[in-house]
Image (cartoon, rainbow, N blue to C red):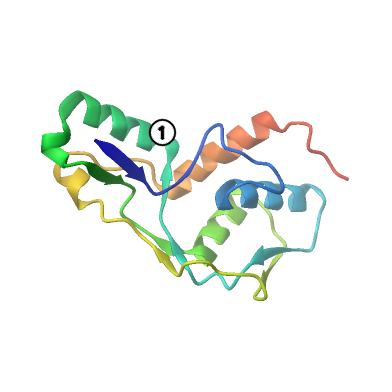
Amino acid sequence: MSVMPCNLYGIGDNYHPQNAHVIPMLIRRFHEAKINNLPETTVWGTGTPRREFLFADDLAEAVVFLMENKDAKDVGEFINIGSGYDMPISEIVELIKETVGYEGKLVYDKTKPDGTMLKLMDVSKINALGWKAKTELKDGLKIAYRDFLEKYKNIRER
C-alpha cells in the first residue's frame, strides 16, 4: 500500500531562508524579525487559502500503525494520512507568530500568489481503521520552534 500525507512539519525540518516550506519558513522569518526588533514582517498572499498540516511524528506513528495492523486488502492501494482539519493560512500565521513571540505587525503581500485555495484530505478511511492524529497544531508548533532554536543557536541580531 502507499500512503499520501498532507503538508508536514516538525522536528528536523528544513528552515532554509529561501527553500523551506511554509511553517519552517515562517518560524525562521518571525524569529529573525523578533531578534532584530523589526516593526513588521511580510507574508506572501492574502492569507485566505486553507491548509491542513500534520506533525511529522504523527505521520510516522500512522505508518507504523498501518504496517503492524493492516495490509493492502484492508485499505486498498492508497490511503491518505492527515489531521483532517484545515484552517486559513492567516490563522496559521498568527499561531506561529504567537509561538515565536514576535510582536510586530504582519503585512500580507497580495501581489504574491496564494496557491491552491483549499488543500484538505479525506482521512475518514484511516480514522475508521483506528488511527487519528494526536498532535494539535499549536502544540506541534511549540515543538518545532524548540527544534529550530536548538539547531540555529547561531542566528543572532544582524
Instruction: Give the farthest residue toward the right.
Output: 158
Q: Residues within 10 Å of mark 1 (few under 14, many from 20)?
A: some
- Report the front residue among 8 and 4: 4
- Horizontal arrangement in the rendering, residue 51 relative to residue 132 (left or right): right
Residue closest to the far left:
73
Q: Please, which residue is most extreme toward the front here?
A: 77
Quarter of the rendering occupied by the N terminus: top left
Total numbered badges shown on the rendered structure: 1
Query: In which image quadrant can residue 94 be found?
Result: bottom right
Horizontal and vertical percent position of residue 24: 60, 46
* Residue at horizontal 53 percent and vertical 41 percent from the top: 142
Work out whether 67 lies above or below 98: above
Please give the name of the residue rendered at 76% of the width and 53% of the height, measured from the top-left corner.
33
Q: Position of residue 122 (x, y in %)?
A: 26, 56
Q: Residue at x 65, y 29 (%)?
A: 150
Residue 38 placement (x, y as % from top left): 80, 58
Q: Amino acid at mark 1?
A: Asp
Q: Quadrant of residue 97?
A: bottom right
Residue lying furthest bottom in this view? 110
Give left or right: position of 154 versus 50: right
- The local secondary structure at tag 1 comes to helix
- Disc 1: which residue: 57
At which x and y percent is residue 45?
61, 70
Left or right: where does residue 88 sit relative to residue 72? right
Q: Nearer the viewer, residue 8 or 102?
A: 8
Q: Is residue 53 left or right of residue 34?
A: left
Picture quarter with the C terminus: top right
At x 29%, y 38%, the residue is: 2
Q: Is residue 40 above or below residue 73?
A: below
